[in-house]
C-alpha cells in the first residue's frame, strides 16, 4: 500500500506537471509587455518626417530585418477566404511565427456571418497583436477597431480606409483593397502576393508595431 506521504508527493508532482504544461498555453495569465529585440535599419522611416495617423511610409527594403519580437509574443491570426492571396499570407504568417518562436493562434472565419464574431473571438483571447489576412475582413475591422483602441491590429495585404491609431497595415500596388465601398484598386494583382512579399509584409508590419509606429500604412512596392 502506498504511504500517505508518498501519495501526497505523487499528487504534488502531478499537479506540478500539469501546471508546467499549461502555463505556456494559458493566455489568461499576465506576461511582460512585448518589446522589440533589435533595431530598425536606416531608411525604415524618415526621421525628419512626422508620421501622422493614416500616413504612408515606404521603408527601404530589408530595413525591418533586424527587429524581432520578444519571447512570449502573443499573436492571433484571423483569416477569411480560401483564395490564393489569402493562403499565401496565412502561410507567411505561420512561417514567421515558427521562425520567431511566437505564441501564434489562428481564428478562421467560416463564412460571411462569422467575420465579426471571428474578430471578437480573437479579441477575447487578449493577444498582444491581431493579424488579419483576407479582404473579407477589411469592412468588419473598420467597424470594430475604432471601439477597441487598446487592442493592436495588423492588416497584411490590404488596408482600412480610415485607420485608427491601433491599426497598422502593410500594402503594395498589387494589393491595396480598402473595403467594399471602395473596392480593389485598378492595379490589384493576385500574382503580386508572392512568398517573398508576403513574408516581408508580416515582418515589416510587426517591426513597425513593436516600435510603436502604428496607425500608418507600410508600403512595400520595392523589396
Image (tube, rainbow, N blue to C red):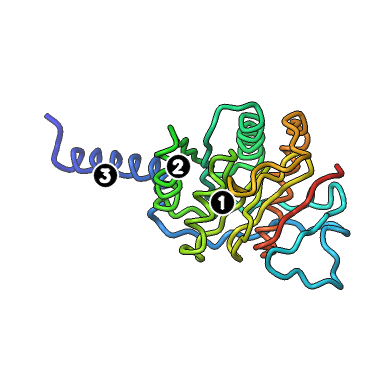
Residue shown at 60% from the left, 47% from the top: 179
SS of the residue under disc 1: loop
* Residue 171 vs residue 76, the one in the foreground: 171
Cβ atoms under marks 2 and 1 closer than 8 Å:
no
CA neighbours of label 3 inside 10 A, class few (<14), some (14 to 19), many (20+): few
Q: Quadrant of the C terminus?
A: top right
Give the labeled residue for mark 3: 12
Above or below for 43 versus 47: above
Number of callouts: 3
As displayed, is residue 188 above or below residue 158?
A: above
Residue 59: % across, % down: 83, 54
- Give the spatial CA distance, label 3 vs label 1: 30 Å
Of badges 3 and 1, nearer the viewer stands 1
Q: Find disc 1 in the rendering and name its residue.
A: 73
**Label pair 3/2, CB-CB below 8 angstroms:** no
Q: Is residue 190 above or below residue 30?
A: above
Classify mark 3: helix, strand or loop: helix
Distance Cα–Cα, label 2 vs label 1: 24 Å
3 with respect to 174 (left or right): left
Whole-percent x and y of residue 12?
A: 26, 44
**Could you tell me residue 85's position as x and y percent?**
66, 31
Q: Quadrant of residue 19?
A: top left
Q: Residues within 10 Å of mark 1 (few under 14, many from 20)?
A: many
Q: Which mark is residue 115?
A: 2
- Classify mark 2: helix, strand or loop: helix
Residue 57 as seen in the image, left or right of residue 53: right
Residue depicted at x 38% and y 54%? 28
Q: Nearer the viewer, residue 5 or 56?
A: 56
Of 196 and 118, nearer the camera is 118
Amino acid at each position: 500500500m502506498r504511504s500517505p506521504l508518498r501519495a501526497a508527493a505523487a499528487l504534488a508532482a502531478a499537479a506540478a506537471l500539469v501546471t508546467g504544461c499549461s502555463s505556456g498555453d494559458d493566455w489568461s495569465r499576465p506576461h511582460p509587455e512585448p518589446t522589440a529585440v533589435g533595431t530598425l535599419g536606416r531608411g525604415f522611416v524618415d526621421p525628419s518626417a512626422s508620421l501622422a495617423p493614416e500616413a504612408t511610409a515606404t521603408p527601404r527594403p530589408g530595413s525591418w530585418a533586424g527587429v524581432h519580437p520578444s519571447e512570449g509574443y502573443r499573436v492571433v491570426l484571423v483569416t477569411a477566404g480560401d483564395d490564393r492571396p489569402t493562403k499565401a499570407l496565412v502561410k507567411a504568417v505561420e512561417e514567421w511565427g515558427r521562425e520567431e518562436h511566437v505564441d501564434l493562434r489562428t481564428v478562421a472565419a467560416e463564412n460571411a456571418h462569422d467575420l465579426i464574431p471571428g474578430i471578437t473571438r480573437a479579441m477575447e483571447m487578449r493577444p498582444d497583436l491581431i493579424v488579419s489576412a483576407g479582404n473579407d475582413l477589411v469592412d468588419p475591422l473598420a467597424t470594430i477597431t475604432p471601439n477597441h483602441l487598446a487592442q493592436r491590429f495588423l492588416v497584411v495585404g490590404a488596408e482600412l480606409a480610415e485607420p485608427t491609431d491601433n491599426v497598422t497595415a502593410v500594402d503594395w500596388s498589387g494589393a491595396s483593397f480598402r473595403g467594399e465601398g471602395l473596392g480593389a484598386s485598378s492595379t490589384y494583382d493576385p500574382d503580386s502576393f508572392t512568398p517573398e512579399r508576403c513574408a516581408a509584409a508580416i515582418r515589416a508590419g510587426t517591426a513597425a508595431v513593436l516600435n510603436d509606429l502604428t496607425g500608418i500604412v507600410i508600403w512595400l512596392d520595392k523589396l
